[in-house]
Amino acid sequence: MTLNVLSVASEAVPLVKTGGLADVVGALPEALAPHGAVLTTMLPGYPAVLAALSKRPKALHKWDSLLGEPARLLAGKIGGHALLVLDAPGLFAREGGPYGDATGRDWRDNWRRFAAFGRAAADVAAGAVKGIAFDLVHAHDWQAAMTLAYMRFAPAGATPPSVITIHNMAFQGHYGADIFAGLELPPYAFAIDGVEYHGGVSFLKAGLAAANAITTVSPTYAREIREPGFGMGLEGLIRGREAEVSGIVNGIDPTVWNPASDPALPATYTARTLARRAANTLALEAEFGLQPGNGPLFVVISRLTWQKGMDVLLEAADHLVGIGGRLALLGSGDAALESGFHAAAARHPGRIAVRIGYDEALSHRMLGGGDAILVPSRFEPCGLTQLYGLAYGCVPVVSCTGGLADTVIDANLAARNAGAATGVQFDSVRYQTLADALTRTVQLFHQTETWRGLQRAGMKADFAWERSGQAYAELYASLVETP
């Protein structure tokens, strides 16, 4: 049986991306195709998305007033798969990012923008477009969560079962109670089992309460969000729906992330030709202005935020240099952290180098030339950089949380003896634990055969989308069979 699924999200590669959400949404149609699920992706009509459509895209449906704005639904393609775009100029035709202006400040009307997006998706799911029907709706994060609330509280017709995926519980779409009237929901939706949250409105909470199933992007994160430290205030709801919560690890695209064929690398290589990585390391040192050294070259490709543990890494930067390591960092975020890493680079010229911003090709070169990639996150729903590191033989050094715990096998004695170890894990993100992990990494690096074993084991690990795609397809089938 072929299942037709409407995948609703605020971003998807290659059209619009701010984080890992876009990678997952963009990969799912191809990942699910071999398993009998046909995905149609629905996105907001940002300028970049509209520009990717044909010059005269087909209009499938029109709204005279979608939460006060005229809108239409356009048809297109994304990676050869069906795409629906909500063209609502009053909501999405603006310069800046998907969620904020050029200065990074959130759009003040984000609640209306993504509520309207959810209202439109719910209408589509209920059969608003003649000849198009869906067996299931899959919503992603808070920006798409209101789709499920509208399906529950204000359906425009019979609606299919639904699943919502939490890519990061920290982002929930909280707004004051004053916006409720503008949502055009019935009064009874403003309730503890509806959209209400501590006297206001929570888009994510509304979607979690309405979905038939809830997934996260790793099994460990699915367990962690039941606890206050990770549930971000919604742990009670998650515990109450424990039977409907599961975790499916994200995958990566081996056609994009493959050191054997990566055009961004000065030298390509495989697990059998790891010696060729040396050319990439030399090129990376030159690109960052780093001095050659006998110790490992650590790399960081990350948002510079508290969640990512960057404050603790900054605290441990002097220790990293003191034990013979070097650091190349690519990222942006908190201004104080950006300034702090610049100061660390000034203290250690030739040993620490920083690039503020993001450069996709440079990230590939860092993975192909770096010895170890640091991911000291306080919480990490799944994480993709450690998966890229594994694929490139850039040994992950990670905190033991979320998807990091699920995808990296610590280089303890038993794992090393079994040939299963792929990286270094540490508990509790604080200075001493990270410093100890850095020291252990340097020690392992100087054990050449052991280090090569870590690299080869990581490169053999299978984190392509095949297994994850099958897991999603099985979940979809179970919901359709027993809605």
Image: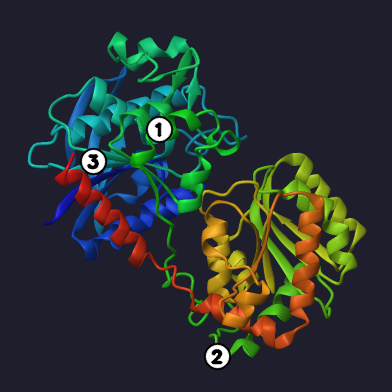
- Name the residue furthest left: 131
Disc 2 to disc 1, C-alpha distance: 49 Å
Q: Which marked residue is nearer to the observer: mark 2 or mark 3?
A: 2
Residues 243 and 358: in front is 243
Disc 2 to disc 3, C-alpha distance: 48 Å
Disc 3 to disc 1, C-alpha distance: 14 Å
* Residue found 87% across the figure and 61% down from its top: 319
- Name the residue furthest front: 414
Residue 290: x percent and y percent? 81, 71
- Please say whether residue 160 is visible from this viewpoint: yes
* Residue found 60% across the figure and 59% down from its top: 359
Q: Which residue is mark 3?
A: 74
Residue 397: x percent and y percent? 67, 64
The disc labelled 3 sits on which kind of residue? Leu
- Residue 15 placement, left or right of 330: left
Q: Residues within 10 Å of mark 1 (few under 14, many from 20)?
A: some
* Residue found 19% across the figure and 24% down from its top: 155
Mark 3 and mark 1 lie on one chain; the one further toward the N terminus is 3
- Residue 372 placement, left or right of 294: left
Which quadrant holds the N terminus?
Answer: bottom left
Q: Which residue is mark 2?
A: 272
Residue 283: x percent and y percent? 70, 78
Q: Which residue is mark 1?
A: 92
The kind of secondary structure element at disc 1 is helix
Which quadrant holds the C terminus?
Answer: top left
